Amino acid sequence: MRGFDSLIVLFDGALRTLAGVHRVQRASPAAQVAEDALDAHARAEAAALMRVNHVGEICAQALYQGQALTARDPQTRGTLAQAATEEQDHLVWSAQRIAELGGRQSLLNPLWYGGAFALGAVAGALGDRWNLAFVAETERQVEAHLEGHLARLGDADARTRAVVEGMRADEARHRQSALALGAAELPEPVKLGMRAMAKLMTTLAYRV
Ligand SMILES: [Fe+2]
Ligand SMILES: [Fe+2]
C-alpha cells in the first residue's frame, strides 16, 4: 500500500507541475519591479528565454521528485524536499513572466518531465553521494546558464532580470547545500554528457 501511496503522490506532483497549479512560498522577485517599455523583438526574445527557463524548472521538479523518492538519508531527503519547494516558486515565477511577455510555454513539457524524472530516479538509485553530486553539477550548470541569459537580456528588461537573478541566487544555494551534505565529484565524461543534453533541451525549448 505504501508503494501505491507514493505512486499517487508522484502522479499528483507530475499533474500539478504540467498543469502549473503549484502554490508559491515567496512572491516573484519581479513583483516590485516596474515594467520597462520593450519593443516586439525584445519581448519575443525575453519570452523565449523564459520558456527555456520554465522548461528547466519543469525538469527540476521531475528531477527532485525522482531523487527524493530514492534518497536514503533523511537529512538528504529533507534538503532535496526544501530545494524542490523553492523550485516550485521558480516554476511559477517563470510561467508568470512568460504570460506577462505574451509568450507561451513549451509544447514538449510532458516529454521534458518524463525524461528528467527517469534521470533523477537513476541518480537516486546510485546512492546519496552520487545523488547529491548530480544535484550539485545540475545546479552549477543552471547557474552558468542563467548567467548567460542575463548577458543576453542586457539592462533593458528589469522585470525579467529580477526573476532570473532570484532563481540564480537560489540555485547557488542548492549547489552549496548539496556539497555540504557530502556530494561526490562527477566524472568529467558524465558532466560533458549532462552539458550536451542540456544544450539539446535548451535549443529545442527556445523554439518549441
Ligand atoms: Fe530553479
Ligand atoms: Fe535549484
Image (cartoon, rainbow, N blue to C red):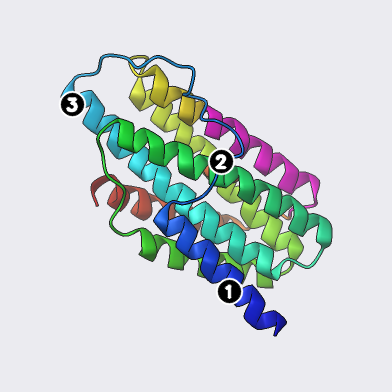
- Residue 203 badge: none
Q: Magenta part of the protein: which range?
A: 166-183
CA distance separating discs 1 and 2: 22 Å
Q: Which residue is farthest bottom?
A: 1
Type of the residue with mark 3: His
Q: In the shown orientation, is residue 1 left or right of residue 43? A: right
Type of the residue with mark 1: Ile
- Residue on which the image places disc 1: 8
Q: In which quarter of the image is the N terminus?
A: bottom right
As drawn, 31 above or below 206 = above
Estimate the x, y position of residue 170 in percent, counting from the top left. 61, 35
Estimate the x, y position of residue 2 in percent, counting from the top left. 71, 80
Evaluate if marks 1 and 3 touch, with contact meaning CB atoms under 8 Å apart.
Answer: no
Which image quarter: residue 128?
Answer: bottom right
| Sequence-first disc among 2 and 3 | 2
- Residue on which the image places disc 2: 24
| Sequence-first disc among 1 and 3 | 1
Measuring 17% from the left and 25% from the top, which residue is drawn there? 40
Nearest the viewer among 189 and 157 is 157
Which image quarter: residue 152?
Answer: top left
- Residue 41 badge: 3
Mark whose residue sits in front, 2 or 3: 2
Q: Label 1, secondary structure: give it.
A: helix
Q: In the shown orientation, is residue 31 left or right of residue 34? A: right
As drawn, 22 above or below 173 = below
